[in-house]
């Protein structure tokens, strides 16, 4: 079994079979491409730790967390191959460095309000789309939804006080909607003239896409003083606001839809830098 065959096998047997996200599959494809480019499509049984060192030396242009992610992908592929009976190197022989800390972009509740108010009528943008765009920002901040989760919403999903969401890795959770978002939902649905079931309508009456949302935020950056605004920054703002107001980190983990507490730990520093230090020292995964 070659390196490419092992990756393809893992993608089909695990990623596709478990219906994991397209982003997960993309990560494995990029990892496969990077490794093969550096060390060739060698037989998996001949793969050694030295090959990994060669790859790391040739891939120094990669961001540290990207390289770390590729190593994690390789370890999972090796683990799966060994289950299938392939005599290859143990994944435990390939160490994974600690995740590099990346600054978290976030906005205060007051700044989110200012961003929503900055979305005003302008030439070429209908009143319906103005209200829709305000709702996008407000709902992202109210719920902590990912962009894809937001785009997948239907009108029936927001009929109740809570929104049922199936997130990454098919992990279900409930999201809660604040009063501002509720009001915007009512305004938006009242002005709609279509019969589509989607909550957010894009061009041609079709469901709004993730590309549409990112394009909206790209335009928003030129219209507001907050030049680094992007959808995930709103999700960060949601998490940061909860934590700063006393939300327990394990409660936040469930609200965010994280599979691992280590994903939620990136927000600890905004409440107390000592919490992040203690977590890094004592938590093992």
Image (spheres, rainbow, N blue to C red):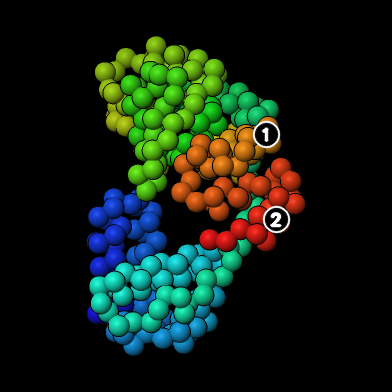
The outermost residue toward the top is 190
Position in image of residue 95 (x %, y %): 51, 75
Q: Residue at x 27, y 79 (%)?
A: 86
Residue 84 higher or lower than 136, as above or below: below
> What x and y, as percent, mark residue 151?
38, 35
At a point 28% along the width and 53% down the height, the residue shown is 18
Left or right, 34 with reference to 123 = left
Q: Is residue 19 left or right of residue 63?
A: left
Q: Which residue is mark 1?
A: 246
Q: Earlier in the sequence, mark 1 or mark 2?
A: 1
Nearer the observer, 221 or 138: 138
What residue do we see at 47% from left, 64% from top? 69
Image height of 34 relative to 147, above or below: below
Give the residue pinned by disc 2: 278
Closer to the camera in the image, 127 or 112: 112
Mark yes or no: residue 44 visible: yes
Q: Position of residue 161 (x, y in %)?
A: 45, 19
Which secondary structure, mark 2?
Answer: helix
In the displayed structure image, the side of residue 203 where residue 225 appears, left or right: right
């Amino acid at each position: 079994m070659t390196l490419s065959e092992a990756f393809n096998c893992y993608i089909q047997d695990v990623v596709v079979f478990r219906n994991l996200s397209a982003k997960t599959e993309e990560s494995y494809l990029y990892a496969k491409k990077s490794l093969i480019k550096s060390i060739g499509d060698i037989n998996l049984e001949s793969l050694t730790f030295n090959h990994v060192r060669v790859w790391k030396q040739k891939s120094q242009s990669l961001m540290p967390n990207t390289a770390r992610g590729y190593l994690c992908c390789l370890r999972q592929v090796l683990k799966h191959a060994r289950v299938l009976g392939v005599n290859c190197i143990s994944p435990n022989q390939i160490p994974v460095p600690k995740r590099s800390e990346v600054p978290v972009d976030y906005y205060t509740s007051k700044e989110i309000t200012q961003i929503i108010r900055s979305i005003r009528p302008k030439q070429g943008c209908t009143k319906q789309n103005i209200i829709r765009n305000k709702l996008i920002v407000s709902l992202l901040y109210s719920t902590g939804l990912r962009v894809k989760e937001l785009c997948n919403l239907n009108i029936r999903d927001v009929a109740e006080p809570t929104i049922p969401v199936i997130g990454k890795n098919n992990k279900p959770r409930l999201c809660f909607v604040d009063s501002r978002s509720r009001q915007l939902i009512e305004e938006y649905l009242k002005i709609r003239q279509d019969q589509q079931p989607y909550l957010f309508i894009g061009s041609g009456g079709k469901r709004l896409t993730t590309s549409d949302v990112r394009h909206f935020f790209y335009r928003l950056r030129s219209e507001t003083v907050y030049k680094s605004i992007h959808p995930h920054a709103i999700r960060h703002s949601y998490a940061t606001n909860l934590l700063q107001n006393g939300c327990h980190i394990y409660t936040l983990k469930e609200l965010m839809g994280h599979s691992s507490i280590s994903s939620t730990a990136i927000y600890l520093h905004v409440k107390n830098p000592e919490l992040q230090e203690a977590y890094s020292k004592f938590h093992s995964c």
